[in-house]
Image: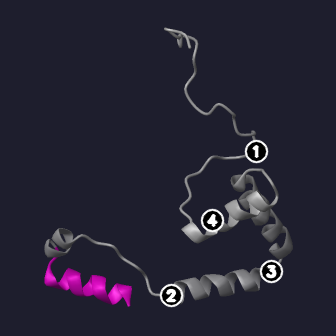
């Protein structure tokens, strides 16, 4: 190992750039979903679970491109699910009683 390294020509950012048709996003997924994709990559003996997620989404879009009714039905189901609101106790205390009631009714 060297005693000193010269990083004066170094560049910040990812070592492997994404392709021009891809956009880097931060996406929050359930742990079970990530674990499932990682397990599939391991079964295939290598690869990138990010690419696998992308491939699955591309296939889904191709198969369901013209199925607007199923998409709208999915959206309706999602809108009918109870909403989850996370609020700190001190934030709740800062709300007026009317605001607290409104928040509670929006969650049900």
* Residue 37 at x, y percent in the picture: 70, 63
Q: Earlier in the sequence, mark 3 or mark 1?
A: 1
Q: Secondary structure at mark 3?
A: loop
> What label sits on residue 37 in the rendered view?
none
Depicted 7 relative to depicted 106: above or below: above
Between disc 4 and disc 3, the foreground one is 4
Q: Which residue is mark 1?
A: 21
> What label sits on residue 81 in the rendered view?
2
* Residue 48 at x, y percent in the picture: 73, 51
> What label sits on residue 35 in the rendered view?
4
Q: Residue placed at 82% from the left, 72% from the top?
A: 65
- Are the residues tagged 4 and 1 within 8 Å (C-beta)? no
| Gap between marks 3 and 1 measured at Cα | 25 Å
Categorize mark 3 by other alpha carbons within 10 Å: few (<14), some (14-19), many (20+): few
Q: Earlier in the sequence, mark 4 or mark 2?
A: 4
- Are the residues tagged 4 and 2 within 8 Å (C-beta)? no
Is-magenta flag for residue 104? yes
């Amino acid at each position: 190992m060297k005693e000193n390294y010269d990083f004066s020509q170094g560049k910040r950012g990812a070592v492997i750039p994404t392709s021009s048709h891809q956009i880097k996003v931060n996406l929050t997924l359930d742990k079970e979903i990530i674990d499932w994709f990682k397990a599939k990559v391991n079964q295939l003996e290598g690869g990138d679970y990010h690419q696998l997620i992308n491939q699955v989404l591309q296939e889904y879009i191709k198969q369901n491109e013209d199925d607007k009714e199923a998409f709208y039905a999915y959206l309706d189901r999602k809108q009918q699910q109870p909403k989850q609101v996370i609020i700190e106790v001190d934030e709740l205390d800062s709300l007026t009683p009317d605001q607290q009631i409104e928040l509670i009714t929006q969650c049900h």
